[in-house]
Image: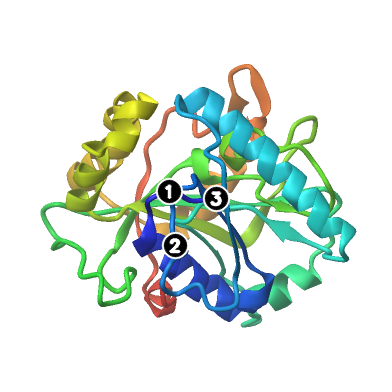
Amino acid sequence: MARNDDFFLNCWIKYYGQQFGEENLYVYLDGLDQKPPAGAGQANVKIVEKQGIKVVDAEKRRLDFLSDRAAELFSTGYELVIGCDADEFLMVDSPAGKTLAEYLSSLRINTSVSPLGLDVGQHLHNEKPLDKSKPVLAQRHYALINSRFTKTNIIAKPVRWGRGFHRVNGHNFRIDPCLYLLHLGNADYDALMDKFNSQDIIARGEQAHYKRARFRVIDSISRGKAMDGDRVFAKARTIQTLFRQVFAWNKPSMLGMRWVIRLPERFKNIEI
């Protein structure tokens, strides 16, 4: 489900369309004032009533709505459903060179499987503003390992997602060693500022979240000393598997550690 996010939504349709076929994509535009994206192609795009204004209520309604839609897709014969936002891109780093569809098809998934969350951000001292005519990952080299994006967003049966796809209610999570979820919503400081000052974000009461979480990602990346991602990915999975969010046993935690990593060079070949 997306709202006022044409750039990433068009990227999302192009990327996942190449992975799974556009006809297997389901996009719900949040609000009757929305218009289908220019690159919709054969994706199934529906404009629905706005799910709410204030962020907590809107998120609950949004994920209840999407959980219901996922259940409908399973009833039509789909074996797996992936839920993610317009600025989130699931990728596989398989030694066997499998495509994302091939790799997911090879897994035995009882309820869900999770990718390791990488929050890609602009390094204000080393990277220029994003050129939207060029692939994003060719211009961005750093990320924060962020357990908020280690989501239970790949499901094998009808479930109830918690807000933001962060967990599946009543079920544990399992982090796969070859899957990553790249969050690109913080990849450009100027675009983030524009969104921060938009009427939608102000009306939702979400500016505090932007200051506390999203701008902080860019600050951490710009100030921190980056580690080699390949050296710490396995350790991060272990930490997130062993430690959980306070009062949420089925949500992973990094124990407050903010590990800035340099993305592996091979990630640049991913065309997003």
Identified by mark 3, the residue type is Met
- Residue 64 at x, y percent in the picture: 69, 36
Give the residue type that dot 1 points to.
Asp
On residue 1, which mark appears? 3
Q: How many tags in the picture? A: 3
Compared to residue 173, the image places residue 269 above or below, namely below
- Residue found at x 28% / y 64%: 140
Asked whether residue 135 is in view, the answer is yes
The residue type indicated by label 2 comes to: Leu
Q: Say whether disc 1 or disc 3 marks the residue closer to the N-terminus.
A: 3
Mark 1 or mark 3: which is in front? 1
Q: Earlier in the sequence, mark 1 or mark 2?
A: 2
Which quarter shows the C terminus?
A: bottom left
> Label 2: how many residues lie within 10 Å, few (<14), some (14-19) or many (20+)?
many
Q: Does the rendering let one see residue 216?
A: no
Q: Are marks 1 and 3 in contact (CB under 8 Å)?
A: no
Question: What element does badge 1 sit on?
Answer: loop
Q: Is residue 178 left or right of residue 181?
A: right
Residue 224 location (% of width, % of height): 23, 43
Image position, residue 80 (x, y; %): 78, 61
Secondary structure of the residue carrying numbered label 3: loop
In the structure shown, which secondary structural element does the residue marked by tag 2 occupy?
helix
Distance from Cα at disc 1 to Cα at disc 2: 16 Å
The residue pinned by badge 1 equals 33
Position of 93 with respect to 272 (left or right) is right
Q: For the point 75% across and 31% down, which residue is it?
A: 169
Q: Which residue is mark 2?
A: 9
Per the rendering, the mark at residue 95 is none
Q: Residues within 10 Å of mark 3 (few under 14, many from 20)?
A: many
Give me the residue at 50% from left, 72% from top: 40
Compared across the picture, whether 171 is left or right of 45 comes to right
